[in-house]
Image: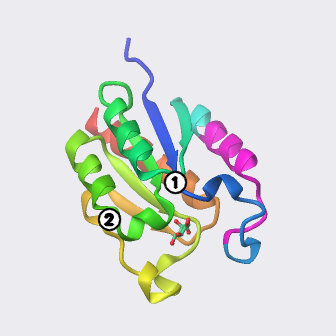
């Protein structure tokens, strides 16, 4: 019998404040409520899901290392680290777990320093601009990818 897939969602800096943080940009849905919706979507797709949040680059890198042999896919919103963390990019490359990059806002429609992601090239793909739904679309994309992989 095939075991159910395990997915890890990683939220980077300041995302624990979703709901109260710049609601005009990120919406009013709370961090806890977004995670409940993610868990619900994973259940619907028959996958297990753990959620991790950290404001520290090193803790995110370590979480990638610990994900080896445990998770088959990762949904990552690295927050501001997206734009400059070579350490997180290297961690994604090192562990080779399919990772989908997520942003609530459309980073390409914002300040120029947000247009570039140093992570995108080592991720399966990038979903940006759909608010909390970005996470749900990423979960679906990963489920379809993992299904294809067998
Ligand atoms: C973000 C976009 C980043 O530029 C920003 O630093 C964040 C959130 C998003 O989800 O839209 O913290 O990743």
Give how far across and how far down residue 15 sits, in percent: 62, 57
Quarter the N terminus occupies: top left
Residue under the image location 58 percent in, 72 percent down: 105
Residue underneath mark 2: 120
Instruction: Give the colour scheme of this rendering.
Output: rainbow
Give how far across and how far down residue 55 sits, in percent: 54, 52
The answer to whether the residue bearing label 1 lies less than 8 angstroms from the nearest atom of ligand 1 is: yes
Residue underneath mark 1: 12
Along the horizontal axis of the image, is 88 left or right of 59?
left
Quarter the C terminus occupies: top left
Q: Which residues are magenta?
A: 26-41
Q: Which mark is residue 85?
A: none
Residue 88 seen: yes
47 vs 87, nearest the viewer: 87
Q: Residues within 10 Å of mark 1 (few under 14, many from 20)?
A: many
Residue 123 seen: no
Residue lying at the far left of the rendered structure:
94
Which quarter of the figure has residue 59? top left
Residue under the image location 51 percent in, 86 percent down: 109
18 vs 37, nearest the viewer: 18
Find out whether the residues at labels 1 and 2 contact each other: C-beta distance under 8 Å: no
Which quarter of the figure has residue 82? bottom left
Ligand 1 is in which quadrant of the figure?
A: bottom right
Q: Is residue 16 above or below residue 41?
A: below
Is residue 92 located in the magenta-colored stretch of the structure? no
Which quarter of the figure has residue 42? top right
Spatial CA distance of label 1 from label 2 is 15 Å
Q: Secondary structure at mark 1?
A: loop
């Amino acid at each position: 019998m095939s075991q159910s897939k395990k997915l890890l969602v990683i939220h980077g800096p300041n995302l624990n404040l979703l709901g109260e943080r710049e609601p005009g940009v990120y919406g009013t849905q709370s961090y806890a409520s977004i995670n409940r919706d993610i868990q619900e979507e994973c259940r619907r797709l028959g996958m297990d899901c753990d959620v991790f949040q950290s404001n520290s680059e090193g803790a995110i890198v370590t979480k990638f290392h610990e994900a080896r042999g445990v998770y088959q896919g990762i949904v990552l919103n690295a927050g501001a680290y997206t734009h400059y963390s070579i350490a997180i990019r290297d961690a994604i490359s090192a562990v080779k777990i399919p990772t989908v990059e997520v942003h609530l806002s459309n980073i390409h429609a914002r300040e120029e320093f947000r247009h570039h992601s140093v992570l995108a090239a080592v991720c399966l793909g990038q979903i940006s601009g759909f608010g909390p739904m970005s996470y749900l679309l990423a979960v679906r994309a990963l489920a379809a990818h993992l299904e294809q992989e067998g």
